[in-house]
Image: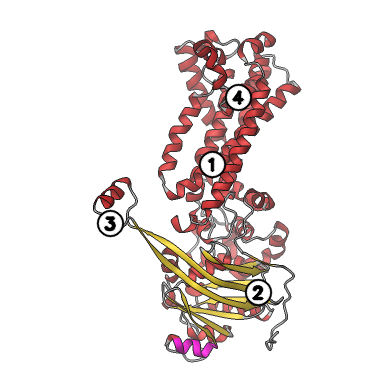
Amino acid sequence: MSYPDNTSIVVDGVSKEFTLRYQRTLKQVTVALAKGRDISDTFKAVDDVSFTVEQGESIGLMGLNGSGKSTLLKLINGIMRPDSGQVLTRGRIAGLIATGAGFHPQLTGRENVFLNAAILGMSEAETKRKFDAIVDFADIGRFLETPVGNYSSGMFARLGFAVAIHVDADVFLADEVLAVGDRPFKKKCLERMAEIRDSGVTLFYVSHAAASVRKMCDRVLVLEKGRLAFDGDVGEGIRYLKYEDADPGNEPDEVDSLGDEELGADI
Amino acid sequence: MVTRPGRAEHVVDAPLTPPSSSQGLLEVFRRRYLLRLLVARELNARYAASFLGFLWSYINPLSQLFIYWFVLGKIVGMEDRVPGDFAVHVFCGLVVVHFFTETFAAGTRSIVRNKSLVQKMALPREMFPVASMLVSLFHVGPQLLILTVVCLFSGWVPDPVGLLALLLALAIAMVLGTALAILFSAANVFFRDFASAVGILTNFVRFGAPMIYPFTLVEERFGGFAPYYLLNPIADAVLLVQRAFWVGATPDPDATAAEHLPDHLFLYGLGGLAASLVVLAVAQAVFSRFENKVPERL
């Protein structure tokens, strides 16, 4: 099947099944078999989802906790492969998924910036070129030469965030990213994401905050128990979810969504 | 195309591809820069907050050397059966065996240990076992330095054939170690039992190579079965390092080589390398097959 040149993401009939394990040890398996109980069970985290995204579109992905948002994002990011169906993407993918993953507590901020940038696919030259901008964005001052293990959680998050947001990408994925950081930093991040969107990068934004989705996105996808329940206009999508709309212009209340990523990832 | 007000047009000149497309080990070599940083991170982290720092990479093998030399050389009396310096004989084996077992053991644990990265980042996952191998390889350097200095004192002269033997031995340990590390690192995700099993396997390796006993002893005890012993690539690698260093450090190198090294050693070595490459190909195939389930099982 062929897609137009400006297609950025294709998700075609994608399903992802997870195995839930009840028993793991030899003893448990033996007992379960003897009693005739199931030793495993499966669970569809993403169930036959299809959609295509054009280059430059800004998509808000919404849904309740455990509806499969994080799994879908992992499939698009290439961390996981679908069990059936196919995912296709065009160009380089970057994003604010698990910012700071791979930070080593014993290495300094500077060393971790280089390591993290390399993990995100940046070359040495590219990192050097952007280093000042990254440090500037993170705004951690003289802690740059301190091991990140000594950072406060806010500083840790800011540094991870600063690296991720400076990766040149064609597709930008953002998952529940604004849960940490203080108010000015959140604002700075949203502004930067708007800049990225305006430069024509495809944006894929996962959030529970109706206000920020309304501000950032021009199309909403809603997942319900792994199935694509809604695909269309932002306002309708938010109404579909029956989310109370915050006053327009308010800061998004991302605190509600704390811990969702963990939930979504552990299922 | 729908135009969106206020947005620049961003044209991507790339084909639509599956984001998780992985070329396995090839991809690892394509991202050498990241590999280098991961190895550096591992090395820095291992010796961080340690007063002796990198000196530990000398102390560990030296302490093992001392134990083998004293217990087996002096107490068991293996010294009398081996010409030249028994410590050099042991150390030649230790270089290869230590490199191999470290790669195998650390590589097996590598994916589980880097859980947070594996679950959240799209990286070629073979990266982690390969990085473990390079960290172990890094520690071979100091050991070879010690070995060279000691051998020079015993009148050893470097020779090209010896150098080839050393390189072949390292290649065998490197390829086989990486192959097993890749295979077991994936297996360890599904059942952590594999990390424990590796501990047992490495013990077999330690005593299954002619390190603390000379190869002549094997021939003496097993006679016609000795060639089967040489089917173990690590045993060949140990003998090759002995060819590179120990033989030249004995009083009569030619006699030592004739008596204590098997015939066609290089042939066995090349065979071992070929077999290791086959194991590596199999390991890569198995890894690619099961890789898909790795993030959810961690």
Examine the rendering and report whether any part of residue A263 can be seen: yes
Circle 2 residue: A8
Residue located 56% across and 31% down the image:
B58
x then y, percent, for residue B260: 61, 13
Same subunit, tags 2 and 4: no
Q: Is residue A133 above or below residue A60?
A: above
Q: Main secondary structure of the magenta part?
A: helix
Co-location on one chain, circles 3 and 1:
no
Q: Quadrant of the C terminus of chain B?
A: bottom left
**Residue B209 vertical placement versus B10 (above, below):** above
Queried whether the magenta region covers residue A91, the answer comes back as: no
Kind of residue indicated by mark 2? Ser
Spatial distance from mark 2 to mark 4, Cα to Cα?
A: 53 Å
Disc marking residue A74 = none
The residue indicated by pointer 4 is B236
Q: Chain of mark 3?
A: A
